[in-house]
Image (cartoon, rainbow, N blue to C red):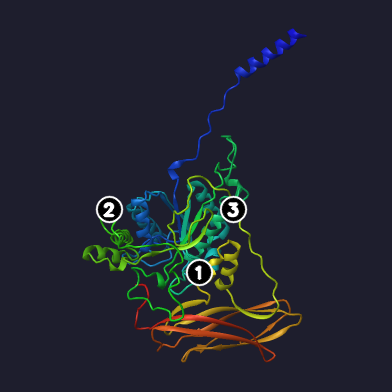
Amino acid sequence: MKTLWSILVFASMQVAAQQATAPARPGDDDRYRADILLIMAHPDDETGDIAAYLARAIYEEHRRVAVICITRGDGGGNAVGNTRAAALGAEREMEGREALAFLAVKNVWFLGAPDTPAQDVLRSLEHWDHGSALAQIVRLVRLTRPEVILTWLPLYVAGENHADHQAASVVATEAFDLAGDPTAFAEQLSAGRDDLDFNTEGLHAWQPQKLYYYSDAYDAGGYWLRNPPIPSPFRKNFLEGAGPQYAATDVSPSQHRSYAQIAAKEVSFYLTQDGMIGKTALESGDFKKFEFPTRLVFGKSLVGGSVTGDVFEAVVARPVPFAPTRGLQEQARRGLSLEFGGSWEFYPKFWKAHNIERLAQLLPVPEVSVRAGGRLHIPLIVRNDTGISREVHLMPVLPDGWRDDTKYQTLPVASGDSYPLMASLSVAETEKNGWREVTWAAEADGQQVGVVTLRVCVVARNDDAGLAQ
């Protein structure tokens, strides 16, 4: 019996000796690793104040920066040629690659979503195919493994009302919260190593640590403004104290020139857009248009740090665990109510769902900008959370000379239902620069059931104060 046992053991050792040893599994490709992942909508969205900050981070702090540009900018105009549409998009992509290469940024992806010249974030998300764009961005977050994500501010504010900018901020925020979730876009992940398996992508889930936003609202300033912006009499600069601030007038120790001058050079590559502003500044040596400070908005951090502290304050040099968000938890409604619709309805829910509800404190009262003689289209929603159908009357209170062109003023709202309405206002052509307030009151059975207020920054027809060139 002992002899048989010895034979079996010897045979097992022989088989084991003949088995091949698996090769060491390759690690993640560090060529694409980033400290900061900038997620933006168009080529040139990084210019101005953000370029000054990126130069500081790259040259002085030796941060690795990667960029995702969701569109190719094919929906805009062309300041130097006849190309439009897809051909313009090809030119703008080349401009973007050259401009970012000037900042030593080599890892740049253009996703090719349609450029949507609109003001409704939901429209851009629909045109982009929201889910497809999000999947691509989550993939690149997992590939680049950034500690920090930087993107546009998800907020409609006077001066910053481009739908694509806000849509970029939405998908970037969602990607921040989903890239670390192994059940989200799980087809991108793989724990195995089978060269014959082409159904998974071999990435790993990755949780970024901090999220920051930036804005080209009038409050931010910028090279694109012809004249100083019109300050609001209703509030302070909403960007003050909202996050870290970096001076563009500081001189780069490594480049021996101001960050404003570096930003002007970076802008000069975008000749199809506002590149001539940067080129003129370089030729004249006057960089005042580029000396606005970078004002970032703190979104959230999974590692601590203060609101106004440095972007990399508290960042740790190791992966952090996935941090799920609580999601949206709506409260039950009662009675009749009047609310803004569209972006203004979406954002408060979005902020709560993604644990960034602090953004609601930036602008408690919604606002827009419009040129004198222009028209405003404002989405409103009347909700009926009572047990019976009701008729609700809307009454606007407008500045002198404005006209209400809304098609209906009385809305039949069924029990438990809501009624959306697009209010239409014509702004007087004789309006001067300044801020106005518009109010809508809702009444039912002789009683007021809701009031909403909108603040409007009006720019005179013959004055470009506060408007882009």
User: What kind of residue is marked 2?
Assistant: Gln
Q: How far apart are marks 2 and 1 (CA)?
A: 35 Å
User: What kind of residue is marked 3?
Assistant: Ala
* Contact, mark 1 vs mark 3 (Cβ under 8 Å): no
Q: Distance between the residues labelled 1 and 3?
A: 24 Å
Give the label on residue 255, or none: 2
Quarter of the figure with residue 344: bottom right
Q: What element carries label 2?
A: loop
Q: Distance between the residues labelled 2 and 3?
A: 39 Å
Q: Residues within 10 Å of mark 1 (few under 14, many from 20)?
A: many
Sequence-wise, the earlier of marks 1 and 3 is 1
> Residue at coordinates 41% horizontally, 87% vertically from top-left?
431
158 sits left or right of 258 in the view? right
Up-down relation of residue 246 to residue 217 (above or below): above
Up-down relation of residue 95 to residue 239 (above or below): above
> Residue at coordinates 52% horizontally, 71% vertically from top-left?
361
Q: Which of marks 2 and 1 is in front?
A: 2
Up-down relation of residue 419 to residue 316 (above or below): below
Q: How crowded is mark 3: few (under 14 residues within 10 Å), some or many (20 or more)?
A: some
Q: Can residue 184 be seen here?
A: yes
Which image quarter holds the N terminus? Answer: top right
Q: Residue 445 appears at what percent x and percent y? A: 70, 90
> Residue pushed farthest top?
3
* Contact, mark 2 vs mark 3 (Cβ under 8 Å): no
Quarter of the figure with residue 408: bottom right
Q: Nearer the viewer, mark 1 or mark 3?
A: 3
Sequence-wise, the earlier of marks 2 and 1 is 1
Q: Residue 240 appears at what percent x and percent y? A: 43, 69
Q: Can residue 406 be seen here?
A: no
Residue for badge 3: 323
Sequence-wise, the earlier of marks 2 and 3 is 2
Residue for badge 1: 155
